[in-house]
Amino acid sequence: MLSLPSVPRRVRTAVGALLLLAALTALVILPRSDRGTAARQDGAPTRITDGDIPWPREGQAAVTLEGSGRVLTHGAQRPVPIASLAKVMTAYVVLTGHPLRPGEEGPRIEVDRQAAHEAGVGGESTVVVTPGDRRTERELLHLLLLPSANNIARLLARWDAGSEEAFVRKMQRAAQDLGMHDTTYTDAGGIEPTTTSTAADQLKLAREAMRLPVLRDIVSTREATVPGVGRVANTNTNTLLGTSGVVGLKTGSTTPAGGNLLWAAKTDGTHLLLGAVLHQRAHTTPAEGLTAALEASRALIDGLRARPRSTGSEG
């Protein structure tokens, strides 16, 4: 061991304390084995090959422990279609421009003829609505996020910005503001395969989305009842909700995108584990892709929640 005879003892003590604090800070994060590559302290994503983390066998994924300031990724972080995960940004932009307090319904928005006509057209995920009906902002957000209605995504876009095109520009600006530099939005619902992102970028959105109480409440709900529409079930079949600590967020699946899941799970009641699993079984069927995304996410969540998080049990 090297000695520092010329350095006063009190300075050596202070330096030692700082080094110990730094070591403890590095350990109380998402756990990893010594074989893994540590993420940088600046929060930039780091590719890791740690076999102890049950990463998906295909596609890409990213995880972070809220407050840790670092992200762990797996697979090539290249932009891929994200399907209905785009609706998280749609809700985020709407709530940023038209905030709601917990329990507040917000302004009433008139359902236009276009939203009514689009119901059941084109094989998209939609809900039946009646032109002239006036739905509250919160009701429409339920229809956007639970049955993942594309006609409601476009209705909210027109209400907020005058047109879907203008709203998409707002989505893109919001993405840039959040540092989502590998993300491109071309529609409000995510049906277009040109709406693309990465797992790491989606975590940047997830962090901000889960800070909005109304959005957080909606994505943690299995179903809701909207007057005139009835019971609104989560037709995206997020079967993880309510299990393994999962409290949200959003599923998405199309043939080009495969299955995608942006999720949030509680670890010990105080910390929130956020993750994104993208591009599972792409170019098969939406149902097959979604099943694969859910299964891969469950294995990842359970594996991470089961791992020790204290310095005393770090392996």
Image: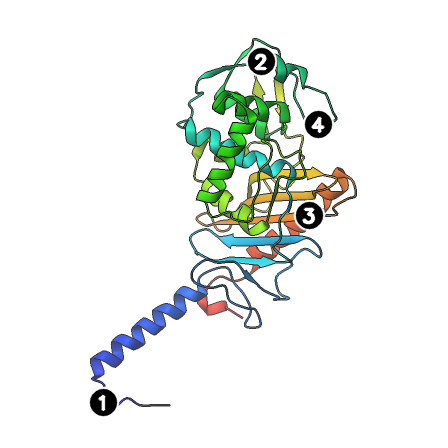
Q: CA distance from mark 3 to mark 2?
A: 34 Å
Given the image, on which type of amino acid does mark 3 rest?
His
Q: Is residue 295 left or right of residue 157?
A: right
Circle 3 is placed at which residue position? Answer: 279
Is 78 left or right of 172, judged from the image as shown? right
Give the secondary structure at mark 1: loop
x and y percent of residue 315 in the render?
54, 71
Measure the alpha-carbon separation of dots 1 and 2: 79 Å
In front of the other: 79 or 2:
79
Q: Secondary structure at mark 2?
A: loop
**Which numbered marker is on residue 112?**
2
- Identify the mark nearer the N-term, 4 or 2: 2
Which amino acid lies under the numbered mark 1 shown in the image of this protein?
Ser
Instruction: Please tell me the numbered disc located at residue 114.
Output: none
Which class describes the residues within 10 Å of circle 1: few (<14), some (14-19), or many (20+)?
Answer: few
Task: Give the mark nearest the N terminus, 1 or 2.
Answer: 1
Callout 2 amino acid = Asp
| Residue 256 drawn at (x, y percent) | 73, 41
- For mark 3, give the secondary structure: strand
Q: CA distance from mark 4 to mark 3?
A: 19 Å
